[in-house]
Image: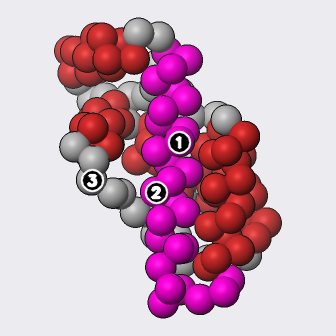
Amino acid sequence: MLEGMGEAEYAVRPFVRSWCIFEMTHTARARLRMQVAVFCVDLDYHRALIHAIAGLSVQRAQALKGADKERIDELVLGRYRSWEAADQHLRLLALDAFAAWYLDPQVGDAGARIARLYQDKALAL
């Protein structure tokens, strides 16, 4: 677990790294589907995860090299025109990626209930 972060925040850590965000937005642009698996059927855990997703920020994302962060930020702002639009798209990507895993019929009824949590939140954005 990352210092100062709970389990839910730890689960969304790829969404706080600039390079990961860059790759995810290009995956979406290529119309590829992304899935993120968290092996847990506790609804309260997923509510906490959705809360963590709601706080994601492209502008606050980190990169190991400052030059990488600056270039990725330029590309992101060039595409989305604002941090708010980039944040909303990132949050939708995250919600969709988590929902996609739980929509798999092999996950079962509990998965369908969890997927609905993510889908409902996405609709509310």
Proximity of marks 1 and 3: CB atoms separated by less than 8 Å: no
Q: How many residues crowd mark 1 within 10 Å: few (<14), some (14–19), many (20+)?
A: some
Most foreground residue, 34 or 46: 34
Label 1 or label 3, whichever comes before in sequence order:
3
Q: Main secondary structure of the magenta part?
A: helix
Label 2 or label 3, whichever comes before in sequence order:
3
Left or right position of 25 against 116 = left
> Where 106 sits versus 66, above or below?
below
Which corner quadrant of the image does residue 113 belong to? bottom right
Amino acid beneath label 2: Ala
Q: Give the Cα distance between marks 2 and 3.
A: 11 Å
Q: Residue at x 40, y 63 (%)?
A: 35
Residue 49 location, x and y as percent? 65, 55
Provide the residue span drawn in magenta: 83-110
Q: Residue at x 28, y 33 (%)?
A: 22
Element under disc 3: loop
- Quadrant location of the C terminus? top right
Element under disc 2: helix
Q: Residue at x 68, y 64 (%)?
A: 116
Residue hosting label 3: 32
Amino acid beneath label 3: Leu
Which corner quadrant of the image does residue 39 belong to? bottom right
User: Which numbered marker is on residue 92?
Assistant: 1
Most foreground residue, 70 or 122: 122
Residue 41 location, x and y as percent? 67, 79
> Where 89 sits versus 104, above or below?
above
Left or right position of 2 against 74 = right
Residue hosting label 2: 97
Amino acid beneath label 1: Leu
Q: Residue at x 64, y 56 (%)?
A: 119
Which corner quadrant of the image does residue 34 belong to? bottom left
Q: How many residues crowd mark 2 within 10 Å: few (<14), some (14–19), many (20+)?
A: some
